[in-house]
Image (cartoon, grey):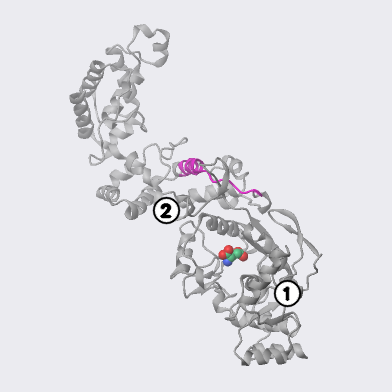
Amino acid sequence: MDNLKMAELLFGSIDKTPEDYEAMYPKRQLPEGARVTRFAPSPTGFLHFGSLFAAFIAAKTAGNDGVFYLRIEDTDKKREVENGVIGMVNGLKDFGIVPDEGALNETDESGDYGPYTQSRRNHIYHAYVKSLVERGLAYPCFMTEGEIAGVREAQEKDKELPGIYGKYAKYRDITVDEAKARIENGDEYVVRLKSPGKPDGRIAFKDEVKGKVEMPENILDIVLLKKDGTPTYHFAHAVDDHLMHTTHVTRGDEWLSSVPIHLQLFYVLGFKAPKYAHISPIMKEDAETGGKRKLSKRKDPEAAVSFYAEAGYPAGAVNEYLMTIANSNYEDWRRANKDESIDKFGFMLSKMSKAGALFDMIKLHDISKTYISTMNTEEVFDAVTAWSAEYDSELNSLIMRDTDYAKSIFSIERGNKKPRKDIGKWSEVKDYIAYFYDELFDGVLGWAENVADEDKKAILTAYLEKYDHTAPQEEWFPTVQVLAEELGFAKSPKDYKADPDAYKGHAGDVAGVIRVAVTGRLNTPDLYSIMQTLGNDKVRERINTAIEKI
Ligand code: GLU
């Protein structure tokens, strides 16, 4: 009877019951075994690489037939920034992660299980706390900050478990009359769980990533509602994950130690607990110590997801990389299934690293090179245009000046069986295409050392005479071979190796001299295609300039 009176005292204006909410948010109509997952950030606006990874894992866990939703956990107003939600939504979208339902921006949302922003769900939390009070499982606690600090001090001194429980839970058995008097007096209070845990109790559960975990049972009378009536993360997530029918809670493993509290909350609330998957943080090799540490927002530029957009790593490449660190068997799968969509891969939480995957920039770059090598000309052109519009206006205007010219550059050695892997990120494009634009061309960067200057001149002068811009591709190397023989070079490396003293070098060296004269570089994609794109006049101009400068 007293419990009911207490509930009325604290929540007199709450007229809905848990049953009402159960009816409002019925079981989802999903195929058997479909999973419901969520990404539940605080709206800080800043998407850390680790949170992107968590969102990616949640999305992949839901897979194609499940539901992945975005819930905004804004119960801690101190951590919030203006437009923090849209910042997170766009951050995810940049990497192709678009939730099936949930918050869309600061005000709008989609889906039938909302509101998806915790600050708009207070009435729901209150109904559930009210029912706990009615059942004698929650109570108002009027302890002051000073009293709590005193308890903490005493516990520290006696090396006891810190927190409010047992004899420290001063208001566990508060009467309705006392609570009423205090409230009338204007005393502030929180609502605490009356924890049913036993001091020597233990719990065991199976974590989807970590495997079997055993821990002491929770005995703390944790706060459910803060002084201002807003819920704690612990309580809010339990109510939300229940009503939104989350099947798998995937989150950072800093929450692992809270599982005893969470399972107890699900238990007292009469909810079926979701499956938990605690993701280990992404690690990084520390250059200073040589050891491993967590990827750090402060020390590592790659910890902010804006880094990837600025550098120009395509979203698809970052996704490939994320899957590589999520499941180490992904790389083998990808090698065997080069053209399949990443969504066909059978991602498994149980195959995630328990220790924490190591961030590897070189690997990301390699993966991105491979990824970009499989993009077609139009895709590369569109991506470079979009990237440069934001980050490199000089590159952008060069490309836009003659889009067909730019496309013909990007089409060189693209689409064939073994495409070249020259570009790892869009910020490398400018250097990659530099010799196609006089504005970027920086002249001859260095000649191969094995051809004497007078031979270079002779090669280039003779080549200019023979050069026919309309000749087909098949004729290009034979022409170089004829030239080579005329100037004392072997027709092939094989001939040269058989009798090195008889020759100055071989046709490959001759072609190399022409390559450097035209492009300034020792290594380029197919030279014939490059010259076709540059045009007759430009090829001749480059060779003439090179001759003059030797
Ligand atoms: N809001 C929590 C955080 O910011 C989310 C934890 C969870 O996914 O349950 O870390």
Instruction: For residue 274, say whether it is visible.
Output: no
Q: Is residue 148 above or below residue 394?
A: below
Question: Which residue is labeled 1 in the image?
Answer: 168
Gap between marks 1 and 2 measured at Cα: 52 Å
Q: Which residues are magenta?
A: 353-371
Q: Tell me where residue 264 appears, x and y as whole percent.
A: 74, 70
User: Callout 1: 10 Å neighbours few (<14), some, many (20+)?
Assistant: some
Q: Is residue 324 above or below residue 305?
A: above
Q: Which residue sits at x=63%, y=44%?
A: 329
Task: Point out the tag, 1 or 2, that comes first from the N-terminus.
Answer: 1
Q: Tell me where residue 313 appears, x and y as whole percent.
A: 44, 48
Instruction: For residue 14, say whether it is visible.
Output: yes
Q: Is ligand 1 closer than 8 angstroms to the Cβ of mark 1?
A: no
Displayed quadrant of residue 224: bottom right
The quarter of the image holding the C terminus is top left
Q: Looking at the image, which is closer to me, 298 or 20? A: 298
Displayed quadrant of residue 244: bottom right
